[in-house]
């Protein structure tokens, strides 16, 4: 079956749309692969007395996002333990592979690494993706990066860079990001650790051979390993893997133009928006939130759409993470417009 935009097959999406349009009857629909997909994902559930119940996609998506985030955290801990156990034999293997030919080339020493990356950036054609979890670099390195990247920007190349949120506190990096964004670079930050990588035209990727050491270090597992070696790959599957990880973090990231943390005012929230975010934080379903606020689920959906736009995120999961970072900080409240009183559930 052809997969739709939601991860379901297009046939399952059409079945759900038909059930929404026509309503569900007391008689359950005939078993089918499409119905099985809807039941497995939770978009449809069985009524205790027979028949089907339609569930809100927004609520289902939020529940899946939180469940997967928990699983990812556990897998990272497991992966960290595995790397720590295998560290003793990894160096011997790397040494044997560095001089071999194949889809992955091993680069040894900062001089060789920087030379290879600089050559790749000079020849980039349309896109440069940079995942930089730790932006702390020497000023001479930042200046060299500025010179290389601005030449690429002037040729029409798109450059997107990711930093960790804690890097917003570094004055030297703030200055660098300010001049780079003025030149046309796009920058976002995310609060979680990630692997360092540089991706050229989605065809070539560089990353340290330390792999996920920065992720594990941030989690308190193991120590920091210096960047003495790196790998370079043109293998389509490996490069696509790095791109997928970059795009996932980018979609949930917060735009940054080099402004110091706290210097950029957070978007004003009215009382209803604050309550919605608090209830989401409590893992309440959209149906329960609408009931508590005495508004319809349709009105709640419109409010959530407006909130995602205001807080510059693309999903309920991103909205929840953004609220986690903001709720403990001074946050200017917006006085509700008297001409728009809270509507009841009947108002829709």
Image: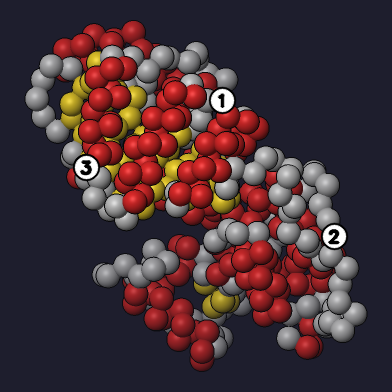
Q: Residue at x 34, y 37 (%)?
A: 148
Tell me: residue 90, above or below residue 143: above
Tell me: residue 222, above or below residue 41: above
Taking 196 as reference, is 42 left or right? right
Alpha-carbon span between mark 1 and mark 3? 36 Å
Residue to which mark 1 is pinned: 219
In this view, the residue in front, 307 or 128, is 128
In this view, the residue in front, 279 or 130, is 130
Per the image, label 2 sits on a secondary structure element best described as loop
Q: Quadrant of the N terminus?
A: bottom left
**Which numbered disc flags the more N-terminal residue, 1 or 2?**
1
Q: Disc 2 vs disc 3: which is toward the camera? A: 3
Q: Are marks 2 and 3 in contact (CB under 8 Å)?
A: no
Q: Residue furthest left?
A: 101
Across and down, in percent, residue 101 comes to 9, 25
The label shown at residue 123 is 3
Q: Around disc 3, counting alpha carbons within 10 Å, would you say few (fewer than 14), some (14 to 19), or many (20 or more)?
A: few
The label shown at residue 333 is 2
């Amino acid at each position: 079956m052809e997969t739709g935009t939601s991860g379901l097959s297009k046939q399952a999406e059409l079945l759900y749309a038909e059930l929404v349009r026509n309503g569900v009857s007391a008689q359950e629909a005939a078993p089918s692969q499409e119905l099985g997909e809807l039941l497995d994902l939770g978009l449809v559930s069985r009524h205790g007395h027979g028949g089907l119940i339609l569930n809100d996609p927004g609520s289902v998506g939020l529940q899946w996002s939180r469940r997967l985030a928990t699983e990812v955290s556990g897998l990272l801990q497991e992966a960290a333990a595995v790397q720590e156990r295998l560290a003793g034999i990894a160096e011997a293997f790397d040494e044997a592979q560095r001089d071999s030919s194949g889809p992955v080339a091993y680069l040894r020493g900062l001089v060789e690494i920087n030379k290879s990356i600089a050559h790749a950036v000079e020849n980039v054609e349309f896109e440069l993706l940079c995942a930089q979890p730790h932006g702390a670099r020497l000023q001479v390195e930042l200046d060299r990066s500025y010179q290389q990247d601005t030449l690429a920007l002037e040729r029409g190349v798109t450059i997107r860079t990711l930093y960790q949120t804690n890097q917003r506190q570094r004055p030297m990096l703030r200055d660098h990001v300010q001049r780079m964004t003025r030149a046309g670079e796009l920058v976002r930050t995310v609060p979680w650790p990630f692997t360092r990588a540089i991706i050229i035209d989605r065809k070539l990727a560089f990353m340290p051979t330390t792999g996920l050491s920065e992720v594990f270090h941030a989690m308190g597992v193991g120590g920091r390993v210096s960047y003495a070696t790196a790998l370079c790959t043109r293998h389509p599957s490996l490069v696509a893997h790095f791109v997928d990880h970059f795009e996932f973090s980018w979609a949930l990231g917060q735009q940054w133009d080099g402004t110091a943390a706290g210097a950029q005012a957070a978007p004003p929230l009215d009382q209803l928006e604050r309550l919605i975010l608090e209830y989401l934080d409590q893992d309440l379903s959209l149906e329960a939130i609408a009931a508590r606020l005495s508004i319809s689920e349709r009105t709640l959906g419109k409010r959530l759409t407006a909130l995602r736009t205001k807080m510059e995120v693309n999903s309920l999961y991103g909205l929840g993470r953004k609220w986690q970072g903001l709720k403990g900080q001074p946050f200017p409240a917006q006085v509700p417009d008297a001409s728009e009183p809270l509507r009841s559930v009947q108002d829709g």
